[in-house]
Amino acid sequence: MEQALHLQDYPVTSTTWDEMCAPDQVRLPYQNVYDFLRQTPVDELNKKEELAKRLFMSQGITFTVYSSGEGIEKIFPFDIIPRIITASEWDFIERGIKQRLRALNLFLKDVYHEQFILKDGIVPSELIYSCPHFLREMQGINVPYDIYVHISGIDLIRDYDGTFYVLEDNLRTPSGVSYMIENREITKRIFPDLIPQNHVRPVTQYPNILHRNLMGLTPRAISNPNVVLLTPGIYNSAYFEHTTLARLMGIELVEGRDLVVENHRVFMKTTAGLQQVDVIYRRVDDDFLDPLVFRPESTLGVSGILSAYRKGNVAIVNAIGNGVADDKAVYVYVPEMIRYYLNEEPLLKNVPTYQLERPDEREHVLQHIHKMVVKKTNESGGYGMLMGHAATESEIENYKKEILKDPRQFIAQPIISLSTAPCYMNGKVQPRRIDLRPFALCGPDGIEIVPGGLTRVALREGSMVVNSSQGGGSKDTWVLSQ
Amino acid sequence: MLSRVADSLYWMARYMERTDSILRMLKINYASSQDNPEEFTWRPVLKIFGSMEEADISAIEKNSRQVLQHMVLDRENPNSVFNMVSKSRENARAVQDNMTKELWQSLNDFYHVMRRPTLTYDLQSDDPISVLDSMIKQCMVYYGVADITMFRGEGLCFMNIGKCLERVTQSADILNVKFSDLSYDLDKTADTTYWKYLLMSVSGYALYLKRYRSGFEARNVIDQLLFNTEFPRSVLYSLNQLQRYFNRLRSDQNTDGFNKVDFQIGKLRSKIQYSDVQSVSSMGLHQYLMDITDDIRAIGITLNQYYFAYS
């Protein structure tokens, strides 16, 4: 009987935190999973991997890549071994994220109204006004319950000693939550009984909480408001997620062409004429939302939707203009925001970040660029990133030139050695780098975080880049109740 | 219901109905080609269901395997089973939130079956009837799942409207294929097996044996396919169903559109109900069938104008 896991072949070092193993011993929460992996022969695990693939395919949990006029269905890679978070770790994460979101919400309200934080010199005005996602169109608009970030997906990583750091705040239209839900469904099928044995907390309540929050935002006082999910359409790589969420909430999935604005109200075109829409959970970026205000060539949005929003006739989730708060240069100031607005010390740490606009920090970064990750402040998905330790000399030289052209567009961070978790790769259990994206929901009654999240994995050995657009995969994420 | 959603459900159902009907037609024609290799030709099938040039038809009309490849798997043939299943599934994909997960999965599974790389080989070297049967089974799963799981709302009405419209068209087309062999002469007697295969291709053989005791003749076959209300693929039965599902859409809104479509359906239905084989033969079967498909097309256009227009 061939085994997939041999402890002597599973490298653990003191420079990287491994979720399953400390040097020479298995961490207690992973004991059940570890035993399971030890007892299960490779053939069995291969079968489970096959089953997972088949389930994803047959349920259409796929995205379509179009080439030569024909669509090909792809699966977002899934690693069958779950990632485990203990009850006490989760308790800390939960408190930390709630604190951070309270501050970020207050910041967004402030920055689009009185701007106390700028006037008090906590955050420099130049930084805000030079951010392309700071939208003057939002100035003075009141949003329901002063909530801007209804849904967030804050990315967390762990350093060599296990400390959690916030890598970035995703406050616009974070994606991946459907994989949190579907990965769990798949795990139920491939590892029967393992979930109850380990006292894993459920994640299925996510759509119900979100739906309740969305209903609560209705501008019309009616018993059955029209809540819709606005998608860019079937060609979007997250389309599967949009249909899943719409179905799980029982709300209408609409495209821009289904909506029309009349007299500052939004309507959808139905077989029985126009019907007013009250709440829009949009998965279309700010830029494409209203061609009259933002990009005029956009066909994904709805002309005049901003005027309906301004009048308070429709609620839009997440609020427009949130990008100013998750700009990677503004990120540096989040701990200050927590102190300023809440008078508390931040629970979750920021990754030390250099702003390249500041001459002394820029000098330091350019000298030590081999030990740095340099990122563009307004890119996401792992695009436009330089990993100093892996780049060639000419890549570095070109990147330096880019930086000097417009330093505001860049930040740098020391390379954090992401924690590793066991993954099943080609018949062997191997450590791979991971991060964690819990999804927090902010509604009229407060902030709730479903115990779980999306664990992204860098599938290539040694790689630190977990983004799905850069070949990353995902894992089911277990939060234990004890 | 969103107009776009209604449109997609309608087309999803139409494509599936067409798929099912073409698969059955191919299966029986293939069986018939084995019985009767000298006289048998695929020409009428290719003319009515395909978009081939005359010369290409002549080249393959006697080659069953090539015809099956063209009708089932050819990516270039817009009416191939492969393309219709893809289109049906693409429509479903865009409105997944308006159907049960089971229904979406049945279509998605069918789609993946059609993309199996071994299919070309199977169709060329294996028993084609087994291959076609495995696809027909996917259609039956789709119908069963739709019937058992779909909520009885507007969405199902639009699906059924699409299905019924398509079924009328298919029944008319199949008569057209078969009678063009006989130059539409109702008195020209073909041999028994000829009619037997036609009836089997529309699952109407058992009913025929019970209802028409006088043996196989063209007039009875026409009667069953056009007028027999016990027969689920007859034109009249499908039109009754169409009227029934369409009537469920009656509401205070969109009365204009409703009245227009209602009028067209009622008119066509009366025309079929109050004619018989005698009047068909005096008018000419070909003309009669063409009129039906024209009227169906007109109903589709009005539906599109008043119910599906969204851009």
Image (tube, coloured by chain):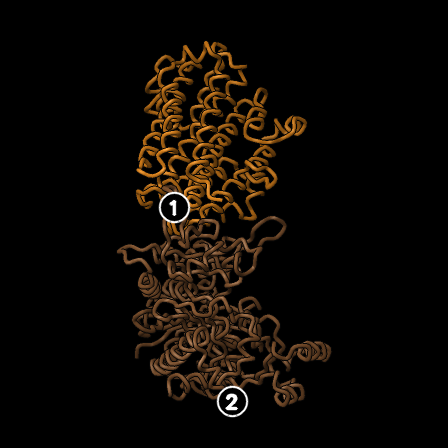
Chain colours: A brown, B orange
Q: Is residue A298 above or below residue A457?
A: above
Eyeballing the image, is B72 above or below B217?
below
- Which residue has dot 1 on it? A274
Q: Chain of mark 2?
A: A
- Tell me whether circle 1 and circle 2 mark residues in contact (CB < 8 Å): no
Q: CA distance from mark 1 to mark 2?
A: 63 Å
N-terminal of the pair, mark 1 or mark 2, is: 2
Name the quadrant containing residue B46: top right
- Quadrant that contains the N terminus of chain B: top left
Question: What amino acid is at disc 1?
Answer: Leu
Q: Judge from the rendering whether residue A99 lies leftward or rightward of residue B31; answer left or right.
A: left
Percent coordinates x, y for residue B163 in the rendering: 41, 35
Q: Nearer the viewer, residue B36 or A237?
A: A237
**Crowding at label 1, few (<14), some or many (≥20) Cα neighbours within 10 Å?**
some
Q: Disc 2 designates what residue? A: A14
Percent position of residue B29, x then y? 51, 27
Q: Quadrant of residue B238?
A: top left
Residue at (33% x, 45% y) in the render:
B150
Q: What kind of residue is marked 2?
A: Ser
Residue B134 makes an appearance in the image: no
Tell me if residue A358 comes above or below residue B53 in the rendering: below
Decide if residue A356 is in sight here. Answer: yes
Residue A348 position, x and y percent, is: 43, 84
Give me the residue at 53% from left, 80% from top. Answer: A125
- Look at the numbered disc 2 and give the secondary structure of its residue: loop
Circle 1 sits in a helix, a strand or a loop, which is it?
strand
